[in-house]
Amino acid sequence: MSKFRILFVCLGNICRSPMAETIMRAKVAERGLSDSVVIDSAGIIGYHQGEPADSRMRSFAFQRGYHIEGVSRPITTDDFYNFDVIVGMDSSNVRDINKRQPADATARVALAAQYVSSEEDVPDPYYGGAAGFTLVIDMLEKICDAIIEREL
Ligand code: 4NP
């Protein structure tokens, strides 16, 4: 069976989408499905390219038992052919993803909250306090459960 390939996208690829990638990896591993799924993340902007995830995001993740690995990269044209679904964290991300989408792209584009039947954005925690980071983790745990339910 071919693997299900999912790419999480946020603005900087240092807070929300690396967190989504990490939570998804953990949940997929818990279910023994790691070999059936390809999981990655990317940013709309390349400003933080090559940097590890934001230290605050990594610290809040660690408190919840998650270890964020990898470094930031911007989304590329190849991503639209190499993934089955590209999941934007907020509606602005989805608009930016759609703008970059080639006409013959094979990936579907989705808003993260759609998986939990909501229009709600996963809010950018970058300029806020602790509550924003905790909220990101809470929302993404529910969203990743729903993605697994729906797609795997
Ligand atoms: P993210 O958060 O999109 O969740 O990674 C942000 C990180 C960096 C910036 C904005 C949002 N920034 O403007 O540098």
Image: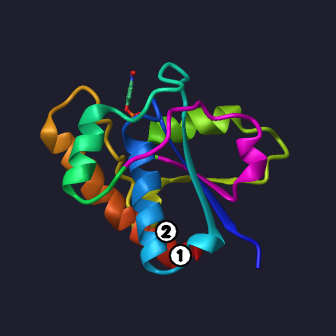
> Which residue is painted at 55% across and 23% down in the image?
46
Where's residue 100, x and y in %?
Answer: 69, 32
On screen, 103 above or below 137? above
In the image, taking residue 53 as reference, residue 35 lies left or right, namely right
Left/right of residue 14 with respect to residue 32 in the rendered view: left
Q: Is residue 120 above or below residue 124?
A: below
Q: Residue furthest top?
A: 47
Label 1 vs label 2: CA separation?
5 Å
User: Disc 1 vs disc 2: Cβ atoms closer than 8 Å?
Assistant: yes
Q: Residue 113 bears which disc, if any? A: none
Q: Position of residue 144 (x, y in %)?
A: 42, 65
The quadrant the C terminus occupies is bottom right
In which quadrant of the rendered view does residue 116 lie? bottom left
Residue 82 as seen in the image, left or right of residue 99? right
- The magenta region covers 68-88
Amino acid at pointer 1: Arg
| Dominant SS in magenta | loop
Q: Nearer the viewer, residue 59 or 140?
A: 59
Cβ of disc 2 within 8 Å of ligand 1? no
List the single residue furthest toward the right: 104
Determine the image quadrant of residue 126: top left
Residue 132: within the magenta?
no
Q: Secondary structure at mark 2?
A: helix
- Residue placed under numbered mark 2 in the picture: 147
**Which residue in the protein does label 1 denote?**
150
Q: Nearer the viewer, residue 33 or 144?
A: 33
